[in-house]
Amino acid sequence: METLIQIINELNGIVWGAPMLILILGVGLYLMVGLIFIPLRKLGYGFKLLWQSKKPQGEGDILPFNALMTSLSATIGTGNIAGVATAIFAGGPGALFWMWCTALVGMATKYSEAVCAVKFREVDAKGNHVGGPMYYIKNGLGKNWLWLGTLFAFFGAFAGFGIGNMVQANSVADVLSSKFSLDKLAVGAVLALFVGLVLIGGIRWIAEVAGRLVPLMALLYVCAGLLILILNASAVPDAINLVITQAFTPTAAAGGFLGASIWAAIRFGVARGVFSNEAGLGSAPIAHAAAMTNSPVRQGLIAMLGTFIDTIIVCSITGLVIIISGAWLGGVDGASLSSAAFEATLPGAGSYIVTFGLVLFAFTTMLGWSVYGERCVQYLFGIKSIIPFRILWIIAIPIGASIKLDFVWLMADTMNALMAMPNLIALVILSPVVFKLTREYFSQ
């Protein structure tokens, strides 16, 4: 077992090393330039389409609005609370700047993913619209590339059980056990019950729950964070200046903070940014492929908002609260750092906001990733594999809640990066299709 852990550790260092981070940023920048910066220029138009998307606009299974909420349910999670804190803990305040950079180019990546997902989606034997990287590889690149789609589906299925299930359940059980002394196995069993009740209805029920729960939980968390920033408004300019300055200069050791190089700020900022918004991983287009739309470009413009909301809004609020509070100098990491920061700036309520925010975020992440994992397994083994997958997904929740997950976390983090490779390759090859569809849409 130790040998296996060592091998996975070394592989993790490679797949999340400099080449991978350069590839993610490079592909995003290439797509952004090829799209003539439309994801940035048309951001307002994207939000306009979002508000108009609560009605069917073509064939599909779920409303375009709910498709975005389903993808956001998977992205707004522990990455927005623990991930941001880890980035700042390891890379200093400058890591937040590189998270922003990842999100800005990631909007072009997420846009392109959704365009390809709708363009090359299929209808399965039950009449459901299915799509994602494995399908746009299969239908867009042809038979010679089928192996690449199979690789994505394989990595996605494994990553889902780790990062989208057991890790989330463990985070919830850990925080509720610490805060309220609840039994971890009992927490996992309750989580499994609620997730199971939603999974009965498949993607339509998941989308309905996400469409109601995600906006509510995100709004509550954002409002709490904004309240802290308003109460400490005089410190916000200095915090932003610190973020920008230390993105390009080493962060000196102070208090419990051990200091960080520029490379550490870049590495942890980009890695945690991708972990949070999932731009380039290829997960979100699986949800967007089911949208009721007749325009790949319209869904792409809605999809790119997920990256903006997740990182530019939610992660920024968490990061600025951490910096303003000074808690990042205390030597605390992960969700505990976010909790300490909110409690320091909003005494009596801050830690509860983070606790319940983490619980809700993790719950919806398990729902969103169940869609991704199910579609990957269906692609590999056919429609008959759906029910066994859902049963295994529910069983994995209490297991994840009650055991130590160091190896599972390592494995899932590695699989996450391996998912991105087939997807990024496909996006580069299919980029002329994306550019052509975009030109045609806006020329009309």
Image (spheres, rainbow, N blue to C red):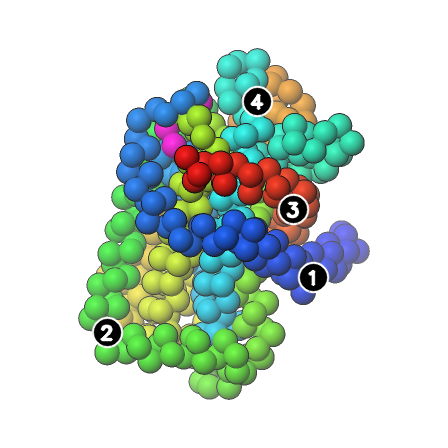
Residue 6 can be seen in this image: yes
Q: Earlier in the sequence, mark 4 or mark 3?
A: 4
Query: Distance from label 4 to label 3 (Cα)?
Result: 21 Å
Kind of residue sitting beneath label 2: Asn
Could you say whether the residue bearing mark 4 is in a helix, strand or loop?
Answer: strand
Looking at the rendered structure, the kind of residue marked 3 is: Val
The disc at residue 428 is 3
Disc 4 versus disc 3: nearer the observer: 3
Count residues near mark 2 (Cα–Cα under 10 Å), then give few for <14, some for 14-19, many for 20+: some
> What type is the residue that disc 1 sits on?
Pro
Q: In the image, is residue 62 part of the stretch drawn in magenta? A: yes
**Residue 346 visible to an observer of this rendering:** no
Whether residue 117 appears in magenta in the rendering, the answer is no
Give the percent coordinates (x, y) of residue 88. 47, 70
Q: Is residue 1 left or right of residue 444?
A: right
| Residue, disc 4 | 122
Secondary structure under badge 1? helix
Residue depth check, mark 1 versus mark 2: number of the one nearer the observer:
1
Label located before the other in sequence (1 or 3): 1
Q: Residue at x 50, y 67 (%)?
A: 98
Q: Where is mark 1, residue-wise?
A: 19
Q: Residue at x 68, y 29 (%)?
A: 138
- Front-lying residue, 63 or 396: 63
Q: Nearer the viewer, residue 148 or 197?
A: 148
User: Which span of residues is magenta-colored?
Assistant: 60-64
Secondary structure of the residue carrying tag 3 is helix
- Give the residue number, with chain letter if any, for mark 2: 232
